[in-house]
Image (tube, rainbow, N blue to C red):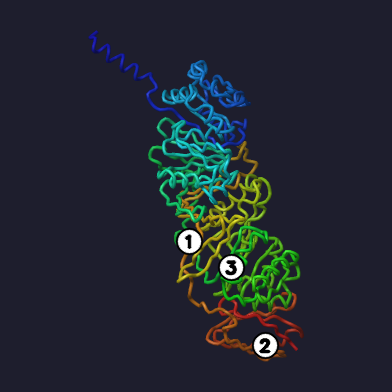
Amino acid sequence: MNPLKILLFLFISCATFAYSQPGRLLLVGGGAEKNEISSWSTPAYRWAGEGKRVAIIGTSTGSLAPYFKQQCGAAYAKEFAIASHDSADSQVLYDTLLTYEVIFFRGGDQFEYYNLYRNTKLQEAVNNLYNSGGTICGTSAGMHILSSIVFTAENGTVYPYESIENPNNIYVTLADDFLNFAPGFIFDTHVAERARFARTVGFLAYYKMNKGTDITGIGMDDMTCMTVDETGMGTVRGTGCANIYVAGSTYSLNGTKLLSGAVQVIQLLQGCTYDFNTKQPTFNTLSRQTNSASFEETGNYTVLASGSNKLTENQSMLTDLVTGTGTASDPVLLLSGDEALADAFRDKLLQLGTPDVNILIINADAGSNAEYAQQISNAVKILFLSNATSVFNQFLKSANGDFLNKKVHFSGMISAFVGDDSRYAGKTVVDNYYTLYASYYAELTFSKGLSLLRQSVIMPNTYFDSDMYENSATAVPYCMALDTLKYGIWLTNHSYMKFEPVEGKAILTGYGTAPVMVICNAGTLTGFSTQTGTGSNTVKPRMVAGFDHLQLSLIDYTTPFVMGNVNTSGTENDPVKKSIFISPNPAKGILHIKIKYCTFEFEIFDIVGFKCMSGFSDSESKEIDISALKPGLYLLKTFHSKDTPTSITKLLKQ
């Protein structure tokens, strides 16, 4: 045979059998693996290890080796406890690891991995294995170290609220001198479980502001993973989302507080894909069409809402209520389910200069109390405080509750909500969110709010306690998908929001040492998690939603957020400014009602809240025959449109 042909044959043969393509990655957001064949973890771990030799590395050993062999079909699996720099730099370890086809970094402490394994034979072996077509895996801390930018946790972990209150705090330690399997990316884990969405954005902001470089973040929910093949195509598997934080937003500081323009966020559920080369996703399982592009907030009134229940953490918002809205001489009507706490807030309002504070206790009798009806009618500023959802919802079904709901929508009205009551300002109210694992076990409950922000859901106390972080984090996008809302708002105990009309725009601003976090649905596709931890279809999936395009903004009073255009039609809704005539009163038979310049509707309720009469006038006056009513006290409500009550008046039938 011609020598040239022999050389060509050998070259082609070597090229055919050599691993010339890069390796594969398994990126796991943490959480306990499950043994069932259809569990969240087994299919992905089988993808990585079936038929292969698997080395599991950490500073201690665990039980992953039997799982890989018995459930995932590994040919062989062994745990390696590498707890020192010297052992990581061993030639024997290097030679041993190169006999494996898969290296899996277990959970633990990523700083130990970074500190002990960097610039060692272990690192060299991992790189060589990957470059020769092997599979590198990591869960929790083990996933953290696989991106080119690493959160090292050198000074310990950093909590999300610390990242947004000061992204330059001592706990944010990022490095770019370890493994480099995902250039231009930073990985974060346990995102849903620990509400780390704000932390991941904090990492992107830190790197941009301090290094001048845009990076992309991938925040993986716990019990969720992504298999990345030799072409760089990642496929999401598991119970939650792979959250992609796209590079390119703007960041700034107000003091130490982090502010950001709209960070594009993509939430990918099981079955969706992400190309690490082109950075393009596919949305195979986001099957629900939602289009909220035309939705906007239009309220021509002011809403204050805080993230904390504590009086000590509401001083700024109360001051704003007294002196920053309306006039300082306006009285405040305080609606509460807790009389003792209401007394404390009343004392503070009086101290701040409010001339008069009336307290209405919302209980089973509040719906038919005539005194309450009159006070609601006269209110200019209303403060909501410590109202249990079940009691408050029942109150809203009463005559007084119905009138309150209409009253707060008057143009020029001022409503303030403390802590947990802030939920009522939105369209959807989330409840049961303090219960451990409520979101994971699909135990969050939902009801209708007052819809002052009728395209929004509001979550106060976002970082109240680590036991409820997942509930507060996942409930907001879940509600947005469930009820087709455009906006979600997260408040912490260090922030409050202000919604108000400014020059024809509905403007949202934030105050406090933490920014207000606003997420907007700017896309058209959503979906819900269908994969359970064990794969069983007898339990409900966790309350996690996917989206093709969200925009997350961190705002305060220096960065107003436009939520829509104010509805200025029919804005003169204040009953004090309307000319209303009712005569005679007391009345026996015919009652004459006149409201200048407009048509109106009317309703008459007895003292226990039963609706006795209702009707409509197609002119500015109406005569009503009330002779059939029994003698006694009634409430007459008149509306010049169905959604804007004009007046509520005591009526005495003789």
Above or below 357: residue 393:
above
Estimate the x, y position of residue 626 in percent, counting from the top left: 69, 86
Mark 2 and mark 1 lie on one chain; the one further toward the N terminus is: 1
Q: Secondary structure at mark 2?
A: strand
Q: Residue at x 62, y 36 (%)?
A: 534
Q: Which residue is mark 1?
A: 558
Q: Residue furthest top?
A: 1
Q: Secondary structure at mark 3?
A: helix
Mark nearer the viewer, 2 or 1: 1
Q: Residues within 10 Å of mark 2 (few under 14, many from 20)?
A: few
Q: Report the residue at 46% width, 33% height from top.
A: 228
Mark 1 Cα shell of 10 Å, populated few (<14), some (14-19), many (≥20): few
Q: Which residue is mark 2?
A: 625
**Residue sitting nearer the eye, 443 or 435:** 435
Residue at which label 3 appears? 320
Could you tell me residue 90's position as x and y percent?
A: 51, 18
* Spatial separation of the CA atoms under disc 2 and disc 3: 47 Å
Kind of residue at disc 3: Asp
Above or below, comparing residue 384 to residue 597 in the picture:
above
Position of residue 138 in the picture relative to residue 540 (left or right): left
- Amino acid type, callout 2: Asp
Q: CA distance from mark 1 to mark 3?
A: 16 Å
Of the image marks 2 and 3, the number of the one nearer the N terminus: 3
Decide: is 41 above or below 620.
above
Q: Earlier in the sequence, mark 1 or mark 3?
A: 3
